Image (cartoon, rainbow, N blue to C red):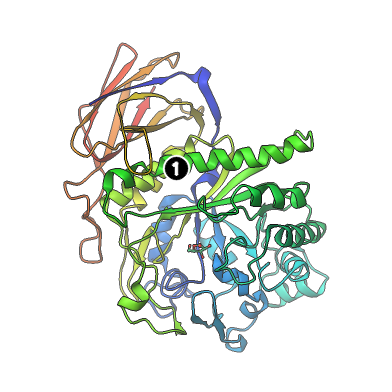
Amino acid sequence: MQARLILNPAFALASVDPRLYGGFAEHLGRCIYGGLYEPGHPAADDMGFRTDVLALLRELQMPTIRYPGGNFVSGYRWEDGIGPQAARPRRLETAWKSTESNHFGTDEFCEWCRRLGTEPMLAVNLGTRGPEDAANLVEYCNHPGGTAWSDRRRANGWERPHGVKLWCLGNEMDGPWQIGHKTADEYGRIACEAAKLMKWVDPSIQLVACGSSGRGMSTFGAWEATILDHTFDHVEYVSIHTYFGNQDGDTANFLAKPDLMSAFIEEVVACCDYVSAKRRSPKRIMLSFDEWNVWYHSHGDRERRHIKDWDVAPPILEDVYTMEDALVAGGMLISLINHADRVRIACLAQIVNVIAAVMTEDRGPSWRQTIYWPLLHASTCGRGTVLRSLVESSTYSCREVRQAPHLSAATVLDPQTGTLTVFAVNRHLTEACDLTAELQGLGRFQAVDWTVLRDDDLKAANSAAHPDRVVPRPEAGATLAAGRLTAALPPASWNVLRLTP
Ligand code: AHR
């Protein structure tokens, strides 16, 4: 199979916002407790943060991490998670039917972010609570001092404000499963009032309104238009969430699903621009793709593994990711990069144990899942200017996508170093893809570095016993000649081709 890629700096799409490579940590299962926080673990630091987990996440260079939910936030009283740990209440956590100790809260998370080298992105509860509690949390986090909430933070040991710049106005409020689910008008009103109050407390913050929780929601489209009618003047972003799975074992169809993510993005952009158009406004609402991933392996685990309601940190949503999942995660990253003009923030959901890039055992080791690798490559090599990738490739038809190109690709030019990076997934399951990339107006490149993630077994996965079963490897055989890059991308592979001047 052959494919052609035409690359020209005149076709620049946008500069990548580094926050495209963010993550998400929720009070859910073992993400916090036993994941990023485990006092008594041999690798725990003075605050109980697992330094082995910090080290693995640090490599990903995630610029922002969303917290504390997710569905969890819609029943959360943030005040439960501050102050002396022994005095914090244990609560029934109804989103995931667990018991929440509240030993980890906002201060611990902001400190954990500092130690990781990332920025917190906090969500407020608009399920059971409202504008006042949301504004109080902004005051607690961001006000320097001399007021009740800011002085509570200082008394709790954080003299300097946490300086949280990015805030989500609730989570998936369109979903009937959400605590405090609302109609679009109900949500639009409360989000607008919360936004006003939060920005009056700290005008420097940026806000994300809840978009649809999935493209399949019956309210999708109308939801975005209605909630933005209410919140347009007060928010910068609308959220968008997508999870894919291979429940029916149709791998060709599964690999094509990132194309549905692209369609979803373009539809949400259309909804946002419809609201701008109605107002004759030059303002453009940007997208925060603050939950994306593969999620299906753990469906039904609660019953299968006899996990009881109200357990503390139960092992739920612990998907073990395979080689083919990494190809889909890579495809989703390609879709995000190719929409970098409107998607400014994205968060892999999630980072530790719960549908996560990193896994841990309680009191034991931590390791990288297969999906870790494409995110690492995109985050470390995918910063700069996105070039629209003109792809000529054979296509295939599958159940959910009519004409899926076998080659999916995105290209980023680093203006500082002149390095050009091509990310490519060969979605053909049996044939190599003979790729020719025509490098127009890009000057001369001296060298090409090629990294491939592939495995003969598409169901291969990493584990505590075999943490390096699926890892990327350098590949030889990519050539540069007469302004052309050529390489034979193996079947079912994730590829990173780096051209240096
Ligand atoms: O990431 C897991 C869950 O998926 C989140 O809590 C929720 O927002 C979404 O439905």
* Quadrant including the C terminus: top left
Q: Residue at x 77, y 63 (%)?
A: 143
| Quarter-of-image position of residue 152 | bottom right
Task: Give coordinates of residue 17: x percent, y percent.
Answer: 56, 40
Q: Which residue is mark 1?
A: 260
Between 394 and 109, the residue placed more toward the observer is 394
With respect to residue 90, does 49 lie above or below?
Answer: above
Residue 53: in sight, yes or no? yes
Q: Is residue 336 visible?
A: no
Q: Is residue 32 above or below residue 477?
A: below
Toward the left, the furthest residue is: 456
Q: Secondary structure at mark 1?
A: helix
Q: How many marks?
A: 1
Quarter where residue 55 is shown: bottom left
Residue that appears at 53% across and 24% down: 12
Q: Is the CB of the residue bearing disc 1 within 8 angstroms of ligand 1?
A: no
**4 up-or-down from 160: above or below:** above
Residue 427 in percent (x, y) is at: 29, 38
Seen in the image, is 152 located left or right of residue 66?
A: right
Residue at the far top: name it: 482
Task: Answer with left or right where residue 193 lies relative to residue 356.
Answer: right
Dot 1 amino acid type: Leu
Q: Nearer the viewer, residue 369 or 419?
A: 369
Q: Residues within 10 Å of mark 1 (few under 14, many from 20)?
A: some
The percent position of residue 280, horizontal first and vertical second, equals 79, 33
